Image: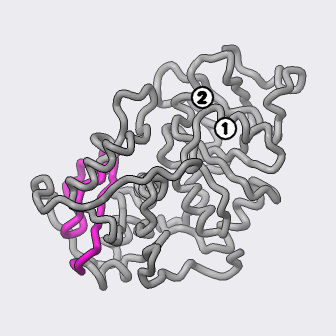
């Protein structure tokens, strides 16, 4: 397991440079054949109008989420992902660097989606666009939609990297697994309202709070590998099977990125996250308060004092 300082960016090999590269690494290779840069910004950051030169849109608010699904930012079908990314000129042999305008936020979601669809030659830009501009590197105005040649990318789904509510329930009942929640502690405890209407406040009984921002330094860069490992060990103890949740499956992927950098390998993201679990349902209990770290999901006697009315 990593015990040293910051992860050192690697030269692209058969599996690419990932999972994290710095602004200097990207700047030295920008424009190289076979290197594709994706901007995965969401919300207001997507509308900022600036991009790393030549970046193509990885539109999580648009075509790269399944809008027919009940939860936002749901993974599209493999055929739909193939169509969108190949139309953006991505080849199976390309190396991808993905970033976002907030730092390391929605870019990790794009990285995890590519990984879940069998594409490993991808990395997240550490610190995102803020780190790029802080280094004095160039940006350009966002231009028209990509009009280059079509790529050869084909999605090859890799089972188990994205899980559903049943998979999360199984992890909550598994003493070898930990379910880590990337939302703020206030939302986890149910003391702050959920930003999406109709959702209960609180957390899954047995889940552990690990806000994604705690994996980052004040400048928005990811923490060194040893610090990441310490954060996950504090949250998950000795459990190596980690499952991640958040509000809509986006910042849960920041935890997945941090865990990968820390040396964990048995990782999965709950795609529906709190947008699904938090809906009123007798099948998905909710706890409030800080939690004890391992309330038993199947024990009504133990859970009842913590459960929020359904």
The local secondary structure at tag 1 comes to helix
- Quarter of the figure with residue 270: top right
* Residue 252 position within the rendered picture, expressed as x and y whole percent measured from the top left: 55, 48
| Part of the protein shown in magenta | 31-58
Residue 183 in view = no
Q: Is residue 48 magenta?
A: yes
Q: Is residue 10 above or below residue 170?
A: below
- Quarter of the figure with residue 231: bottom right
Residue 197 falls left or right of residue 37 = right
Q: Report crowding for label 2: few under 14, some 14 to 19, many 20 or more residues within 10 A (C-alpha).
A: many
Q: Report crowding for label 1: few under 14, some 14 to 19, many 20 or more residues within 10 A (C-alpha).
A: many
Question: Residue sitting at 42 percent across and 80 percent down?
Answer: 12
The local secondary structure at tag 2 comes to helix
Residue 133 falls left or right of residue 185 = left
Q: Is residue 4 above or below residue 198?
A: below
Q: Are marks 2 and 1 in contact (CB under 8 Å)?
A: yes
Residue 69 falls left or right of residue 191 = left
């Amino acid at each position: 397991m990593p015990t040293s300082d910051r992860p050192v960016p690697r030269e692209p090999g058969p599996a690419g440079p990932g999972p994290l590269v710095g602004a200097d690494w990207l700047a030295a290779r920008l424009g190289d054949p076979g290197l594709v840069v994706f901007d995965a910004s969401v919300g207001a950051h997507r509308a900022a109008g600036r991009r790393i030169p030549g970046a193509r849109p990885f539109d999580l608010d648009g075509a790269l989420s399944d809008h027919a699904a009940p939860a936002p930012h749901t993974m599209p079908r493999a055929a739909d992902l193939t169509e969108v990314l190949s139309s953006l000129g991505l080849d199976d042999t390309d190396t991808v660097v993905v970033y976002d305008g907030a730092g390391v936020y929605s870019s990790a979601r794009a990285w995890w989606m590519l990984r879940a669809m069998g594409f490993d030659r991808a990395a997240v830009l550490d610190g995102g666009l803020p780190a790029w501009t802080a280094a004095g590197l160039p940006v350009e105005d966002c231009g028209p939609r990509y009009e280059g040649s079509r790529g050869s990318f084909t999605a090859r789904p890799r089972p188990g990297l994205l899980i559903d509510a049943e998979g999360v329930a199984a992890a909550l009942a598994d003493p070898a697994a930990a379910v880590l929640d990337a939302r703020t502690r206030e939302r986890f405890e149910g003391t702050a309202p959920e930003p999406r209407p109709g959702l209960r406040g609180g957390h899954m009984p047995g889940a552990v709070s690990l806000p994604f921002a705690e994996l980052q330094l004040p400048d928005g860069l990811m923490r060194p590998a040893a610090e990441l490992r310490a954060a996950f060990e504090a949250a998950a103890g000795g459990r190596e099977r980690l499952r991640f949740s958040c509000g809509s499956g986006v910042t849960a992927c920041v935890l997945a990125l941090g865990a990968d950098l820390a040396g964990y390998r048995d990782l999965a993201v709950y795609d529906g996250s709190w947008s699904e679990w938090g809906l009123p349902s007798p099948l998905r209990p909710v706890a409030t308060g800080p939690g004890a770290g391992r309330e038993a999901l199947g024990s009504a006697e133990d859970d009842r004092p913590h459960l929020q009315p359904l």
